Image (spheres, helix red, strand yellow):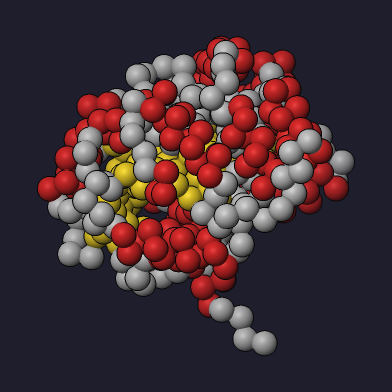
Amino acid sequence: MEISENVSKIKYAIRDILISAREVEKKGKKLYFFNIGDPNKYDFDTPQFLKDALVEAISVDKANYYSESIGDIELRTEIVRRQKRLWGTDLDLDKILVTAGVSEAISMISGSMAPGTEVLVPSPVYPSYLSYFTFHDIKGIEYKTQETLDWQPDVEDIRKKISPKTRAILIINPNNPTGAVYSPKKVKEITDVAGEHNLLVISDEIYDLLTYGGSYKSTASLTDVPVLELNGISKTLLSPGWRLGWANLRDEEDKYAQLWDAMSKQSRIRLCANSPIQKAVAKIINNNMDFLIGVNKKLKERATYFAKRINEMEGLSAQIPQGAFYSFPRIDLPIDDTDFILRVLKETGVVFVFGSGFGTLGKQHFRSVVLPEIRMMEEALNHVESFVRKLS
Ligand SMILES: Cc1ncc(COP(=O)(O)O)c(C=O)c1O
């Protein structure tokens, strides 16, 4: 069988690095994982009230059926409530599409746009976007985010990159891979540019409740231009393995009805998102979320510690993350980022991800999660420090 050429273009550095890591592990080296944004692999756990709601959904509510393709109405109603309660935005119940994680929503958006369409994406960028786009012959055109300004987006660069083929601007806020929280002023400036040029704003807000610096606001609360929002439970409800997310379109003039139809069609061919999980999430998504105070406190401590240690190393530097759970340090050493990460892996067992896997501006950087306990970070970063000392 001939294989689609587009498949050969798929890359996902965050998991691809694991292949090399397993080789190193086979040789008996202890590994320290700093590569995957999964809090549940560290000392974070899904809240008990969500676990209980799932047991009830399966056994008492018997939600073991196929649900509507667009998503269970109960969950969509609760998502409308959530967004109103948290960010004051008004969503349309029929413009919420429940998916198997934000990843499936990214796949559906990419599968809906005509080949050759250009979408402006922040650089560095969460790599799924570039891979899904390439897979569907969509062009992800990277716009700069400014490292020395806490990785805030460069709005002038967005303007410069707009072409007759541009149809959308992607915002990822709080940001993966940089840990930035975009200022409401910057977000508003981006949405104004989108308004001037008749572009859709795609706003990935999967980390919306994980902030410990900056002042986060949901994009749709800052503008009237059409916004396709992406969100889910993987990160803020500490349940990445449950695979539940959603897309919602806030589009008062119905400019993007065709895009919505195209996404809805794709939702029908995969039948539905996981029904018991939808039922469970509907029950709790508007609960008190005070457990996140503790989560954000831990993240802040760990993010600050990580950046401090990196900044003490000759040839490395890092901004202090303000949200999500990533840091994106810069490498000013005579070695490229891929070699650096592979050598760190082989010599110290620490698994980071090379920055060039996150787009052009990712070069000479690497991405690390700031999820591990300080004790483990200390041990791993001591090894990295000794390694870097030999290099510089
Ligand atoms: C910015 C961003 N969007 C989307 C995703 C995928 O999320 P999900 O687990 O909902 O598919 C991730 C996961 O790391 C992410 O960082």
Looking at the rendered image, the quarter that the N terminus falls into is: bottom right
Residue 57 position in % (x across, y down): 73, 37
Nearest the viewer among 389 and 235 is 235
Residue 161 position in % (x across, y down): 21, 54
- Would residue 172 appear left or right of 43 to someone viewing this image? left
Question: Looking at the image, which residue is at 51% across and 73% down?
Answer: 6
Q: State the residue lying farthest toward the front.
A: 61
Residue 354 position in % (x across, y down): 55, 45
Nearest the viewer among 105 and 177 is 105
Residue 308 in sight in this render: no
Task: From this view, report whether residue 207 is shown above or below residue 256.
Answer: above
- Would residue 294 appear left or right of 55 to someone viewing this image? left
Number of residue marks = 0
Task: Indicate the quadrant where residue 123 lies.
Answer: top left
Task: Indicate the quadrant where residue 87 lies.
Answer: top left
Question: Looking at the image, which residue is at 40% across and 34% down?
Answer: 173
Residue 245 in sight in this render: yes
- Would residue 254 appear left or right of 72 to someone viewing this image? left
Nearest the viewer among 97 and 229 is 97
- Would residue 82 appear left or right of 16 to someone viewing this image? left
Task: From this view, report whether residue 233 is shown above or below residue 389.
Answer: below
Q: State the residue lying farthest toward the left.
A: 196
Question: Looking at the image, which residue is at 62% across and 53% down?
Answer: 67
Residue 346 position in % (x across, y down): 72, 42
Question: Looking at the image, which residue is at 74% across and 38% down?
Answer: 61
